[in-house]
Amino acid sequence: MLLPRRILRSLWTLLLLSLWLAAAPSVHAGSGAYEAELPADVHTNKDMCSLLPCKDVFPGAAHFSERKGQPPYVEAYDNDTSAKKLLGYVMLSTDITDTPAYSGKPVVTLIGMDASGHFVGVKVLKHSEPILLLGIPESALINFNNQYLGKSVAERIEVGPSRPDEGVVGLDAISGATVTVIAQNQVVLMSGAAVARQAGIIAPIVRDPARFNTLGQKFNWQQLIDMGAVKRLVVKPEQVDLPRDATPFIDLWFGDLNQPDIGRSLLGENGFASLQSRIQSGESAFFIVRTDGAESFKGSGFVRGGIYDRVQVKQGPDSFTFRDLDAFNLYGLEAEGAPRYTESSIFVIRSSSFSAAHPWKLAFLGNRVDRATGHRSFAVFESKYWMPAQLLDGGRPKIEEPDAPWVRVWKTQGLKIALFAVLLVALTIVYALREKLTRLSNHKNKWPVNAFKYFFWAASIVFVGFGAMAQPSITQVLTWFHSVLFQWTWTLFLTDPFIFLFWIFIIATVFLFGRGLFCGWICPFGSLSEALYKVARVLGLKRFQFQLPQVWHDRLKWLKYVIFFGLLAVSMFDMTLAEKLAEVEPFKTTFLVGITNRAWPYGLFVCTLLGLSLFIERPFCKYLCPLGASLAIPSTFRWFGLKRKQDCNSCKACAVGCGAQAIDATGRIDHRECLHCLDCMVLYTDVKGCPPLAKERKRREKEGLPLTPIGKNGYFIPIVPEAKWQEQISAKALDGPDPRMPTNAEHVSALNETTGIRHVVMEVLEHINPWSATGWARHRLLSMLAVPCLIAVMAAWVLLAIGQISTTVIIVAWFVWSVIEVLLRLAGRRYVKDGAWWLSRYRYANLMDMLAYVAFKNLLIGAALLIALRAVNWTVA
């Protein structure tokens, strides 16, 4: 028992080392600006530079003005005397744009620009990018920002190589953080351009004025909504960190008033004529009404002569704000069916840069209060408006809007993305043809299978891992889980095209074949680990290679599930901490950042894992990988498994050669642990390597009988049609369990003896109802207590729908019910379906089977309910 204890201590040491890596702040590069706490009034204090290090981004400046302009900026001077000279400008990026980076939050950046429009300093004050906390050092982002120094805001600056023939100035990206730097480039350029236009450094954008097509028709309110002539902007309380409530924080309707048909429909003939008499040629008017919510869009601090600081209009890079002289009273809406309102106004845009023919956005600045710190900040909420095409002479103009950061990523890496997609499709096709390949192989010549397998290993390591840096991670599973439960954002997943495509492949193949295709064939770190094991064998280390005793393997394999559920639980309370603890995965150090670019403990951890891989086949994959554990759970319900025959229950040939140790003493394959090396499938039809087939082959050769092909059942096809292949099964195997199913088959009369619609109804009821007569008889108290628990959970869903409890509360309640359901089903309905969903094949459920079934089923039900509530605009957030 000495060897297993040493191995056990080694594995525990690895786990403790990974947890220490996550907990030790001293080894986390880039922690300085990560979620840094900024002054509470950083966005409202007029003396911005008394709060922020403006001198860091404008060296040589001795004095800074108060905030001015809209969007705001400060002026930098050489001194504080009457003879002071204007040197340039300093701006805070979030005063101008909230462009989100990879984390979904903006990178708060302080930017300095001289009087000629050249950048003189860029400093990140706060970011929420996990990769800059746990992977790439913050110095990489500093070096990226330093590339702006000396470049002009008027230049066309893009992330990537320079293209002088197109006038493009290139910036070197940060490997592994492409989305972050593309978003950062957009932030720096938009901020600089907004201030440069106000300062007259670059010319304002000139847009063609709107030419209206007057139909001479009056529209009612619903018609105006349907055609897009009026739009809505709703902000919920939880979006500004207030307690959830059925009443919105603010509910606004707005729309253009210059177009004659719209203006007359909303204001009436006299009202429209009065408005036209009060505005000059080239000016544009629009209305805003508040129909619900207690917040004012005019702002509680508004004074005569001041600025309406809660509403702006944005068109392209231009922002338009309003003073008291730009606002008129709105005394009523005359369109039939118009809503009642509690606040209203007509605003006039007096700039010639604005065109009502072009799309624009109404921006509302809501006052957000951080519940933990009490800090106040403004959050920007926007709603897009574009005049209906039929009301414009010649229709809407063609507008070339800048691509979103994720679109740029897809465009700039189109070839690599296409090659990656081809790789995944090719792997799927090859694996679908696995039976043809294994029949061409035997125990001495596995190259028909291994040639493909080794190719995909090499491609996953070199192209996928080190090239595209597309190593899937448990953090993506946690992000997906939170997105489903709280707020789904497609752009969050589209920002990394390789990971996005990879997860489509993973989800599809896990349900088709189990996790083994990804984990065993195309996972970059798994392939690297396996490749090292194979190379070590070739180099003469085979005599030192070993497997853990099966009893220890069966104990240690549960460790990865503990890690996974631990990370999932932590993420519900602190996603940042969960991302730190996810350093149990060596993926960032290996592929994204590199061993030499991280603190020594990270490198030690990776080298230890890879060193163990020389002697133990895939130790991380089998015992520590939380990603593998998360994929193993749905693998319980894979549609197609590897083939087994009755004799496998007494023959140990496949189990002895199984590197994943996924075949038990009865010859059954645990598809949660199987890595699909296909060695057992090679033996399945190998007439010399498979003991039952070898025995039958020798008998036929001795008796001079022909050797017929091997059938799909794994036995020789009978020589004469009247003969039965079952005669080839040994007596010992005939009396043993059926290894073709992971556990013993179960006959469920309510399901096995029904067909058609009745069968579908009965199966739905089986999924919904965990009680059974057997369960009531065995555990009456548990069955009785479960009834009020279910009623309480159903009531919790109702309370969630009406906004009385939070999503976190329903998650806890749903988890408690899931535990109760597991106990109920283990007491009575102790079976699960095996194989494809359209088959009626059921088997005995062990504890892991039932945990996987209930967890996965209730996750889908819970996600569906949350999505449905959001779809009907109930108050769930």
Image: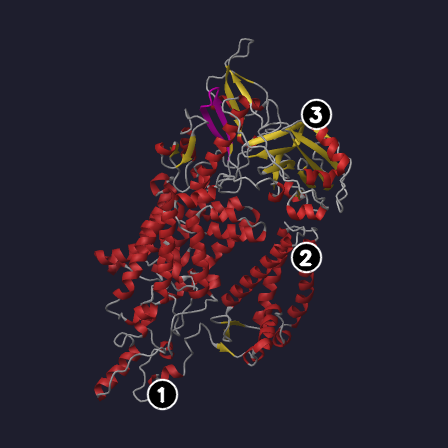
Q: Which residue is mark 2?
A: 796
Q: Earlier in the sequence, mark 2 or mark 3?
A: 3
Residue 254 picture quarter: top right
Q: Are marks 3 and 1 in contact (CB under 8 Å)?
A: no
Position of 446 compared to 129: left or right?
Answer: left
Q: Label 1: few (<14), some or many (≥20) within 10 Å?
A: few
Residue in view at x 39 percent, y 47 percent: 414
Vertical position of residue 346 compared to residue 519: above or below:
above
Q: Main secondary structure of the magenta part?
A: strand
Q: Which residue is mark 1?
A: 724
Magenta-tinted stretch: 109-126
Gap in angstroms between the C-alphas marked 2 and 3:
51 Å
Position of 463 compared to 202: left or right?
Answer: left
Q: Label 2: few (<14), some or many (≥20) within 10 Å?
A: many
Please state the horizontal and vertical placement of residue 830, each as a whole percent of the image: 55, 72
Amino acid type shown at disc 2: Ala
Q: Residue 573: in sight, yes or no?
A: yes
Please state the horizontal and vertical placement of residue 826, each as a whole percent of the image: 56, 70
Viewer-nearest residue: 664 or 319 = 319
Q: Nearer the viewer, mark 2 or mark 3?
A: 3
